[in-house]
Amino acid sequence: MDQKAEKYNKQQSMLYVNHACNIGGNNLVGELLELEPSRVSELKGGRRKLTFKEADILQQEFGLPETSKGYYIEAELFTSEEMRDTKKFDTHSKELHLLRIIQAWNNEETRAFILESLDVHDSLVPDYEAQNVVDENKRKGIEHKNARLMRDFKLEAINALINSPYFSAWCDVIESILSEVSTQDIPSKHQYFKNLLSTTKIDIEIGNSRVLKEQRIYDILKHVNQGRGISIYSDQTEKLVRHLHLLNKVKTLVESGRYSHLVKAPKAWKREYQIELIENAFPQREYVIVGKVVWQSSDHLQVNEKWIEKSILGEMGVDPISSEEGIYRQRQFKSVSMALLFSENYEYYLEVNLKLGENNGLTMRTLIVRISNMKHLFTTLEMLFAFFKISGGVITSGIKAEIADNGGYIPSAIYLK
């Protein structure tokens, strides 16, 4: 046995071993740990300490002792050292933003919105039939066939648009315009985005192609579809502009290769195709912390500065609420809730829930920060409070009292027994 192996303290060792012996008996525990019966008795009596490896063996066979709890959480995992600057946090922000917009691309409702925005006359669709038959069953059959033909025709039109360099150039102009204006200050968003659709033009030459002078999105759609009279419009003009921009931006981002560790590029860019996400590649994962909560913020802690997530779509406006269009824009967090957990391995983890609203807002992002050095617990907490720009200060003396009351460990305190 490795004498330097990490071990639990006497109380924890007794807790694990007695729990296992109560279920399986001393002999089975001895067999699992490859120990003589006398050694098992020493563990039960606290005369010998259990190693972490031995505890894992008992946990796999008999589960956790009744007084131990598993704290389940879906979150991003950081060390406190990684929170001394914003590099990893900002990288995660962009990766999670990519996840949201890929999920939007893959969403059938999003796809349906784009298709519904296309205005196509029946006469343009090959094999489209007039619905003037009397027989009800035949009429329903024709309706079903026509709906399929129309959807396929619209998908071909959108696919032609997605793969057009002219469309890409138009989207670049849109992105440039939106990066220079705060859409929250626009009196009439509907009219503003309607104007973007109807008046934004490009004048470019790509490769050996002829110059398209002052082309609007309607002109480009018609051009890439062999001059057929296809139009695009929606009463939800902002949503339509952002969806069109999204179509091009997703393609550009995936083809760039920068996110090849997260997503797989499709063999062909067609709107009906799903973009495949690489399993377990994104930063948010499932964790179980074996331990207990020893402190949690009683109120939502207010962020005292304007704090906006990094975005992969550029400065295209801040999403102040959880809205459908918000998946394309940056998010601004206004409050934070926290909980400090003390694990059975004598490690501290800070759970951080970032919220859009100032009070009782939805949690939009959850982090777990492992405190790298327990001896510097409270200076590390102060650093983390500053990182998240929490206003008003958090009284560490109150935190210490709650930690002590809940059975946590305070490195600077003298324990009297």
Image (cartoon, helix red, strand yellow):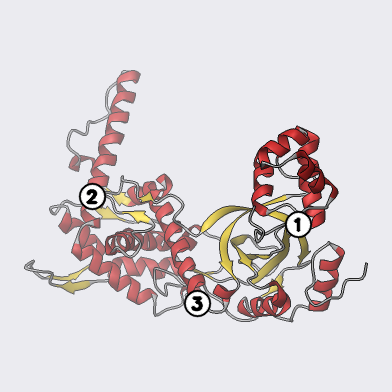
Q: Amino acid at mark 2?
A: Ala
Relative to residue 231, is residue 263 drawn left or right?
Answer: right
Reply above or below: 202 against 103. Answer: below
The residue under label 1 is 292
113, 377: nearer the viewer = 377
Give the percent coordinates (x, y) of residue 245: 34, 63
Residue 185 bears which disc, if any?
3
Relative to residue 98, is residue 357 drawn left or right?
Answer: right
Q: Earlier in the sequence, mark 1 or mark 3?
A: 3
349, 11: nearer the viewer = 11
Q: Secondary structure at mark 3?
A: helix
Q: Amino acid at mark 1?
A: Lys
Q: Is residue 135 visible?
A: yes
- Mark nearest the camera among 1 and 3 is 1
162, 13: nearer the viewer = 13
Residue 268 bears which disc, if any?
2
